[in-house]
Image: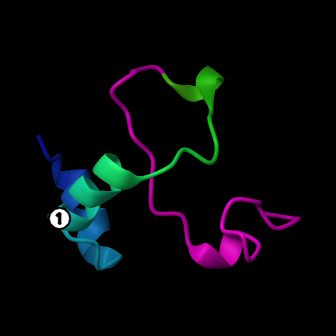
Amino acid sequence: MWTQHCLERMQERDISRNDVKNGIATGEIIEEYPEDYPNPSCLIFGYSVDKFQSDLKTRRKGD
């Protein structure tokens, strides 16, 4: 189920439903926030690549 909030953010960021489905199917967890998950079905994705170093896994300092 797609919430209105989710669909609005996806549209703002030019992320399609297929992009999300592909990310879920083939994506990789690079950060976990176990203390922030009130609902285990929550999914956070789509960080801007400029927040990470060239390996796209290590967060830049200050971000």
- Image quarter hosting the C terminus: bottom right
Magenta-colored segment: predominant secondary structure: loop
What is the x, y in percent for residue 25? 29, 48
The residue furthest left is 1
The residue furthest front is 26
Identify the residue at image location x=62%, y=35%: 32
Q: Quadrant of residue 56?
A: bottom right
How dense is the environment of label 1, judged by Cα within 10 Å: few (below 14), some, or many (20 and up)? few
Identify the residue at image location x=36%, y=53%: 26
What is the x, y in percent for residue 17? 17, 62
> Horizontally, is 31 left or right of 48 in the view?
right
Q: Secondary structure at mark 1?
A: helix
The color scheme shown is rainbow
Q: Which residue is mark 1?
A: 18
Magenta region, residue range? 38-63
The verdict on residue 61 being magenta is yes
Identify the residue at image location x=17%, y=46%: 3
> Horizontally, is 5 left or right of 62 in the view?
left
> Horizontally, is 39 left or right of 32 in the view?
left
Between 10 and 23, the residue placed more toward the observer is 23
What is the x, y in percent for residue 57? 69, 59
- Image quarter hosting the N terminus: top left
What is the x, y in percent for residue 39? 39, 21
Going by the numbered disc 1, the residue's amino acid type is Asn
Identify the residue at image location x=31%, y=65%: 9
The verdict on residue 49 being magenta is yes
> Horizontally, is 29 left or right of 1 in the view?
right
